């Protein structure tokens, strides 16, 4: 049976890597639909994403790659299929609403398995799209206790990724370690500027001429995980902090959905604290 899969390869750079990998694909009678590669000349690291179709023997293909590629190589063969996400929210609706609507009309090819909020504010919006909504309140709980309950509810849905759609709580390191490079956050500034809370107020006070948004993977450092996507818009002295916030919401939802398209298509490599997108 013909299948479609994606081969992701990351390894120390070496002579003839593209030829070696594509020859293995040819040996397995696999058709290459699309291929992209990149070499980081500073770290001497090679990255390659290959879309394949054919009849796969995964075990033999991966064994051939292991034999051929340099020591320290990482390679994954992934089925080209629809991913599942769980979305975490607090009270703001714009990013969540954009994802729900795009998913509804097919603009974002993903299964939204559930939405979990630490407030009940967005339940009505979510249930209009026939998506389960769960309240996991943080009240009278420590951050660790709340994150444990959150993770238990998330794991009921076995998502591929977790999306923080303006989820306004800091996740503890134990939670982050449970989902390495699987938690995508949208931050309402052009990072590394204005990390943390109230970035629009601080941007207004600083008199900036651009504001932006950043989608990134979550790590243990607040708003300092590997950046997936960013964008900005121009502002000027006439903008109040509130006006900046209103204008910025459109950037936030666009950047988040664009970042998710890349992640869900298996186009994002994470190396150290950076991303390579192929």
Image: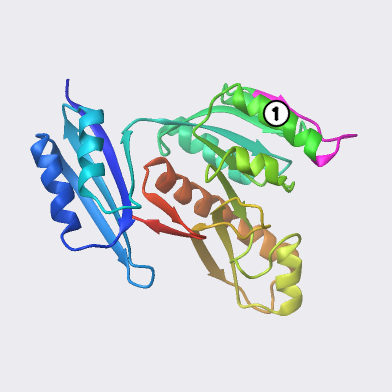
Give the residue drawn at x 71%, y 65%: 200
Q: Callout 1: helix, strand or loop?
A: helix
Which residues fall within the magenta stretch? 133-143
Is 131 on the left or on the right of 228, as rendered?
right
Q: Which residue is mark 1?
A: 123
Is 186 on the left or on the right of 70, as rendered?
right
Give the residue drawn at x 63%, y 28%: 154
Where residue 51 appears, as percent x and y from the top left, is 23, 42
Give the residue drawn at x 49%, y 33%: 160
The quadrant in which residue 209 appears is bottom right
Look at the image and say whether residue 141 sits in the magenta stretch. Answer: yes
On the rendered image, what quadrant is the N terminus found in? top left
* Colour pattern of the rendering: rainbow
Where residue 108 appears, as percent x and y from the top left, is 43, 38
Tell which of 148 and 27 is nearer to you. 27
> Of helix, strand and loop, which mostly describes the magenta segment?
loop
């Amino acid at each position: 049976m013909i299948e479609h899969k994606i081969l992701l390869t990351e390894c120390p750079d070496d002579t003839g890597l593209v030829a070696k990998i594509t020859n293995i694909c040819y040996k397995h009678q696999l058709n290459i639909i699309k291929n992209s590669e990149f070499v980081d000349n500073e770290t001497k690291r090679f990255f390659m994403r290959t879309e394949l179709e054919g009849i796969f023997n995964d075990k033999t293909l991966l064994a051939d790659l292991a034999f051929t590629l340099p020591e320290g190589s990482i390679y994954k063969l992934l089925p080209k299929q629809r991913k599942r996400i769980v979305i975490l929210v607090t009270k703001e609706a714009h990013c969540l609403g954009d994802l729900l609507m795009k998913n509804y009309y097919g603009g974002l090819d993903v299964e939204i398995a559930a939405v979990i909020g630490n407030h009940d504010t967005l339940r009505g919006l979510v249930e209009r799209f026939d998506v389960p909504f769960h309240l996991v309140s943080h009240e009278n709980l420590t951050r660790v206790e709340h994150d444990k309950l959150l993770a238990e509810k998330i794991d009921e849905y076995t998502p591929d990724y977790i999306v923080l759609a303006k989820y306004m709580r800091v996740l503890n390191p134990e939670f982050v370690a449970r989902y390495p490079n699987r938690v995508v956050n949208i931050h309402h500034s052009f990072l590394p500027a204005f990390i943390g809370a109230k970035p629009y107020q601080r941007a207004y006070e600083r008199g900036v001429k651009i504001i932006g948004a950043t989608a990134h993977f979550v790590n243990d450092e607040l708003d300092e995980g590997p950046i997936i996507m960013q964008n900005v818009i121009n502002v000027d002295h006439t903008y109040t902090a509130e006006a900046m916030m209103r204008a910025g919401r459109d950037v936030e939802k666009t950047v988040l959905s664009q970042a998710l398209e890349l992640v869900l298509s298996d186009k994002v490599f994470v190396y150290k604290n950076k991303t390579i997108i192929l």
